[in-house]
């Protein structure tokens, strides 16, 4: 199984500042045949279900604010929130869908400093 | 509007069985792979299983193989998870989720609100 490791486990950022969350996979999730990274990011607010933010490592889901962006390739990926808003307080998860079983990172808890 | 509504959770004794259901609406259910994902209390997300559009292909995480069975009824727009030989470590909120790309190996673009399964004596 592919192991997904996020860093840091928790993060406190001031409103309006940049937040960066990292995700590393134990093997490449880049499919050579289509040059796509099989990596998604989700946001889970307290008491809610997860919400898709990013897929193919960098494609923003419809309706997701453009302050959220994804980058990276192969085994190293980053979710960036360019200007933190109060409503962004949540736990963020990366997920690989390169093969089954799909696996998630352990989550990064984002708080306001 | 896409909606996924889970039901069937509850308290069950170790070794017992439970069947979860997920009612889908707002999209052509028969066109999508579907998944179950679980989350133990205070923990992260764990993918459990998925099923192809016509039910012919299914995949499971190792920890539930031989105990859980995923199925679907496209005529009823419903997804199911039959859980047998339940263990304390199966205690979690179980989410139904749609796979966004219509192919195997996909992100999960819509999630239900979840149903809580508690395995305890």
Image (spheres, helix red, strand yellow):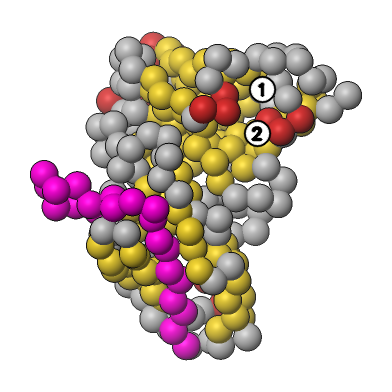
Give, as a single range, the part of the protein colored magenta: A17-37
Query: Where residue A67 appears, x then y in whole percent?
Result: 36, 75
Magenta residue check for A26: yes
Percent position of residue B106, x then y: 31, 40
- Residue B3 sits above or below residue B75 on the image: below
Is residue A52 something that shows in the picture? no
- Residue A99, percent across and down? 33, 38
Under tag 2, what secondary structure? strand
B25 or A43, nearer to the observer:
A43
- Residue at 29%, 50% in the rendered image: A29
Residue name at image x 83 percent, y 27 percent: B120
Q: Which residue is mark 1?
A: B8
- Residue depicted at 60% across the width and 50% down the height: B44
Tell me which residue sits at (57%, 24%) in the image.
B64
The residue beneath circle 2 is B115
Neighbour class for label 1 at 10 Å: few (<14), some, many (≥20)?
A: some
Mark 1 and mark 2 residues within 8 Å of each other at the beta carbon: yes
**Mark found first going from the N terminus, 1 or 2:** 1
The quadrant in which the N terminus of chain B is found is top left
């Amino acid at each position: 199984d592919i192991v997904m490791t996020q860093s840091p486990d928790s993060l406190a950022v001031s409103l309006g500042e940049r937040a960066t969350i990292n995700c590393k996979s134990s093997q490449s999730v880049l499919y050579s045949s289509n040059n796509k990274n099989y990596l998604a990011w989700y946001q889970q607010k307290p008491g809610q279900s997860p919400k898709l933010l990013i897929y193919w490592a960098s494609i923003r889901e419809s309706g997701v604010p453009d302050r959220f962006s994804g980058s990276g390739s192969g085994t190293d990926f980053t979710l960036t929130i360019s200007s933190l808003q109060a409503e962004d307080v949540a736990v963020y998860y990366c997920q690989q869908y390169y093969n089954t079983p799909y696996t998630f990172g352990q989550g990064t808890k984002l708080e306001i400093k | 509007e896409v909606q996924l509504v889970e039901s069937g959770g509850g308290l069950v004794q170790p070794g017992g069985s439970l069947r979860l259901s997920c009612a889908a609406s707002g999209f052509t259910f028969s066109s999508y792979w579907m998944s179950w994902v679980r989350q133990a209390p205070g923990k992260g997300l764990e993918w459990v299983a998925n099923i192809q559009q016509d039910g012919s292909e299914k995949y499971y995480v190792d920890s539930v193989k031989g105990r859980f069975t995923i199925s679907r009824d496209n005529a009823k727009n419903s997804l199911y998870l039959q859980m047998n030989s339940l263990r304390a470590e199966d205690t979690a909120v179980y989410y139904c989720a749609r796979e966004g790309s219509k192919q195997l190996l996909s992100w999960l673009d819509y999630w239900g609100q979840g149903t809580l399964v508690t395995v305890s004596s």
